[in-house]
Image: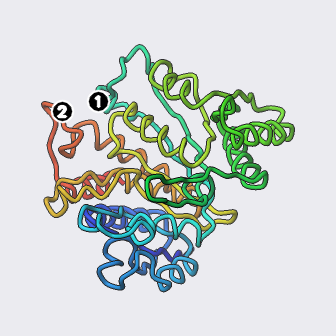
């Protein structure tokens, strides 16, 4: 029987509520598929600032490094808006990615059949289904570049090395090989020198993947094409800031940001899994948060870090079945059964 050690970073706002439901689902899945899970909790974000004065304590890094995988809720909120930039909750999130070497962020944008009507895009544009995987470089680019501020100006530096682009490109090509063998690399090579390096490097890596159809697209055109014809995309690979923006756009095409999971991977099996939505402090403690993105993040964890693809599929199937007639308030439609955060977790467990 396999035994896995998971570090929980529940975070701020609705983070603890949604992580608790995801843990419940993971426990039920472990029971069905004959493996065990041991949990350890650590602080990250605003809650860490309140308890220790910093958004990422060293103890948290140590616990994460000692685990098989990490499950994160969400961080941040107005309470900590007055903190300096290097001590905001979001700095803890950037810090843990760097400390664990999590350079590849996988953000799937999938429309579940029962939620198709929730998409703002017309049915004829979406077609029967939409399944896009955005691969975002996570530890380089403008978020990690040199920055500063003068009396009346400020700057942030976009910088990439060949090695950084090569490794994220290989992750994307490997994923494309397992899907429809089609990869779109997104950059701004008509303006940015870093994007020219990005494009040159991706083309070089493509020589090792002759079966994959590679095309290039400027980021502004990609943003337009995602709403004009999302079916043209399968795997998209792009930089940190472009991926951040495009994946949120793709999430709304799928119907709700509250439904989408993400995985942040290193060169090995260790990964950090989290919903792509924020901490939503305005609804924290009301029992109305949607836990499905976090539950689906657990499915990604089972697939990419724990080597349990059948268990991952069981969770995804259960979510799809539950959505036929049950909704949390954020995705509620007339005639559906409106359920709480905890009730949604119970329903998924029942299906499993």
Q: Which residue is mark 1?
A: 118
- On the picture, is 191 further left or further right than 74? right
The tally of labels here is 2
Instruction: Looking at the image, tell me whether mark 2 or mark 1 is earlier in sequence order.
Output: 1
- The colour scheme applied to this rendered structure is rainbow
Q: Secondary structure at mark 1?
A: helix
Residue appearing at x 41%, y 63% in the figure: 90
Alpha carbon of mark 2 to alpha carbon of mark 1: how far? 8 Å
Residue at the disc numbered 2: 333
Find residue 332 and report its horizontal and vertical position in percent: 19, 38
Across and down, in percent, residue 158 comes to 62, 50
Q: Residue at x 22, y 59 (%)?
A: 281
The quadrant in which the N terminus is found is: bottom right
Residue shown at the point (47%, 80%) measured from the top left:
60
Left-right relation of 339 to 307: left
Q: Which mark is residue 288?
A: none
Spot occupied by residue 52 in the image (x, y as percentages of width and height): 36, 85
Residue 345 vs 71, above or below: the answer is above
Q: Which quarter of the picture shows residue 342?
A: bottom left
Q: Is residue 10 visible?
A: no
Give neighbour class at mark 1: few <14, some 14-19, many 20+ (Cα, 10 Å): some
Q: Are marks 2 and 1 in contact (CB under 8 Å)?
A: yes
Q: Is 90 or 266 nearer to us in this picture?
A: 90
Instruction: Tell me which corner region of the image, top left, top right, bottom left or bottom right, holds residue 123.
Output: top left
Q: Nearer the viewer, residue 4 or 231?
A: 231
Q: Quadrant of the C terminus?
A: bottom left
Q: Tag 2, which secondary structure?
A: loop
Q: Where is residue 166 shown, x and y percent of the image? A: 76, 50
């Amino acid at each position: 029987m396999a035994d896995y050690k998971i570090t929980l970073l529940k975070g701020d706002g609705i983070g603890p509520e949604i992580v608790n439901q995801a843990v419940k689902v993971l426990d039920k899945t472990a029971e069905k598929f004959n493996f065990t899970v041991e949990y350890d909790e650590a602080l990250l974000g605003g809650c860490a600032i309140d308890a220790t004065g910093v958004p990422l304590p060293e103890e948290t890094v140590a616990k994460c490094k000692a685990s098989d995988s990490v499950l994160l809720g969400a961080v941040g909120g107005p309470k900590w808006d007055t903190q300096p930039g290097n001590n905001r909750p979001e700095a803890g999130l950037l810090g843990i990615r760097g400390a664990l070497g999590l350079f590849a962020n996988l953000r799937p944008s999938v429309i579940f059949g029962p939620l198709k009507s929730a998409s703002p895009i017309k049915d004829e544009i979406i077609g029967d289904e939409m399944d896009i995987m955005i691969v975002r470089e996570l530890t380089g680019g403008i978020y990690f570049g040199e920055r500063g501020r003068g009396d009346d100006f400020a700057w942030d530096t976009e910088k990439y090395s060949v090695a950084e682009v090569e490794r994220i490109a290989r992750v994307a090509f490997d994923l494309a090989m397992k899907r429809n063998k089609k990869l779109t690399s997104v950059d701004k090579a008509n303006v940015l020198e870093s994007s020219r390096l990005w494009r040159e490097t991706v083309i070089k890596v493509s020589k090792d993947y002759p079966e994959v159809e590679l095309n290039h697209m400027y980021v502004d055109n990609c943003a337009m094409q995602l709403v004009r014809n999302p079916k043209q995309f399968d795997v998209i690979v792009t930089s940190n800031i472009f991926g951040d923006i495009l994946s949120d756009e793709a999430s709304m095409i799928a119907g709700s940001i509250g439904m989408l999971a993400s995985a942040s991977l290193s060169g090995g099996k260790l990964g950090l899994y989290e919903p792509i939505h924020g901490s939503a402090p305005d609804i924290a403690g009301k029992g109305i948060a949607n836990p499905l993105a976090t539950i689906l993040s657990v499915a990604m964890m089972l697939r990419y870090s724990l080597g349990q693809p059948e268990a991952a599929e069981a969770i995804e199937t259960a979510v799809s079945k539950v959505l036929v007639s049950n909704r949390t308030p954020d995705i509620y439609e007339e005639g559906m059964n409106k359920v709480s955060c905890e009730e949604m977790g119970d329903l998924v467990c029942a299906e499993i």
